[in-house]
Amino acid sequence: MKTRITELFGIEHPIIQGGMHYVGFAELAAAVSNAGGLGLITGLTQRTPELLANEIRRCREMTDKPFGVNLTFLPALSQPDYPGYVRAIIDGGVKAVETAGNNPQKWLPALQEAGIKVIHKCTSVRHSLKAQAIGCDAVSVDGFECGGHPGEDDVPNFILLPRAAEELKIPFVASGGMADGRSLVAALALGAEGMNMGTRFIATKEAPVHQNVKDAIVAASELDTRLVMRPLRNTERVLNNAAVERLVEKEKRLGAELKFEDILAEVGGIYPKVMTDGDMDAGAWSCGMVAGLINDVPTVKQLIDRIMAQAEAIIQQRLRGLLGA
Ligand SMILES: Cc1cc2nc3c(=O)[nH]c(=O)nc-3n(C[C@H](O)[C@H](O)[C@H](O)COP(=O)(O)O)c2cc1C
């Protein structure tokens, strides 16, 4: 399938694997790129720019296809060494960067002068237009369904994507709630040029996370996620568990008085405990409503081939058939 996104990134299928903390290691990024999509290493999971440089080298040893790096701009108090990470990305010869979390304007000239294509992840039309205005090459439009940070507007993709299509000139992918060939065809119909998936890629053989995480996603239904940290205007969609129930209870009790320190036990340093150790009740970890559509743990290649075959069958048979009738 050829779209403006496959052309932009030089990939075979219009499928991107979104940055995921403690999931987006070289193994997963390489598997996605080898299967014809765009795999992304999650920059900040590597604690220093030197470690990121090493992860980029490892990924290159596993694939000769294009892959990228996610660079998330955190609202954190202590800012990571962003200039160092950008340098590691450029020196590593990476050709695609997914930015997220905050306006990437400051870093665009350096990245784009190095020939890197930048796709910015946004949760609203207004932020997408801003990304276009500052010169991003594409956007990833992340609807309310998404795992991770859906923003504060709560607009689901059935509205957000066609609204983005009405306004944007640069290409965009649909992100949030995407799982299969049906998602891809729907995304294309709503004006996107491909799709970005997070949660779906965790439940794959190659995702370098504990088996408990994959099992939890397969077991979860579309009713099992919760929104947390809304009082801090840092809303995150996570899988429900004992720690999340405690967190939600604290949010109810403290209301507008809630401070980040109050919930540190439930959100601080959780990812290695969940993703590496498989301690599923350690705290709040991002997961999309799309868990309700995930029922198996295929290889990345099986998943991507299946998505493309299903998308093609829907277009060629079901949709064409409707017109022929
Ligand atoms: C476990 C997990 C960790 C994530 N970490 C990040 C991150 O560090 N940076 C980022 O930009 N997005 C992050 N995301 C969001 C994904 O890149 C993607 O936008 C989102 O998962 C799409 O929604 P979906 O899960 O419904 O596919 C994360 C998502 C998950 C599920």
Image: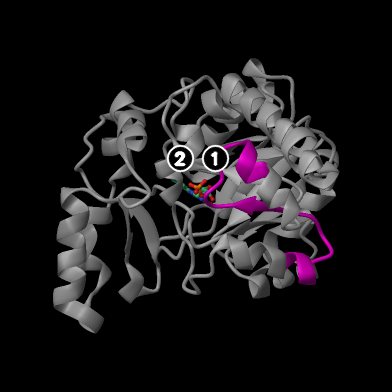
Asked if residue 169 is among those painted magenta in the image, a careful observer would answer yes
Residue 179 — which label? Answer: 1
Q: Mark on residue 293?
A: 2
* Residue appearing at x 61%, y 29% in the figure: 56
Q: Taking 185 as reference, is 162 above or below it?
A: below
Query: Where is residue 27 shown, x and y percent of the image?
Result: 53, 23
Q: Is mark 2 within 8 Å of ligand 1?
A: no
Q: Residues within 10 Å of mark 1 (few under 14, many from 20)?
A: many
Which residue type does callout 2 highlight? Leu
Contact? badges 1 and 2 (CB < 8 Å): yes
Q: Nearer the viewer, residue 72 or 139?
A: 139
**Label 1 is placed on what type of residue?**
Ala
Query: Residue most toward the top?
Result: 61
Q: Is the residue indicated by label 1 positioned so its CB lies within 8 Å of ligand 1?
A: yes
Which quarter of the figure has residue 34? top right
- Badge 2 marks a residue whose secondary structure is helix
Secondary element at image label 1: loop
Residue 94 shows up from this direction: no
Q: As drawn, is 241 to the left or to the right of 195?
A: left
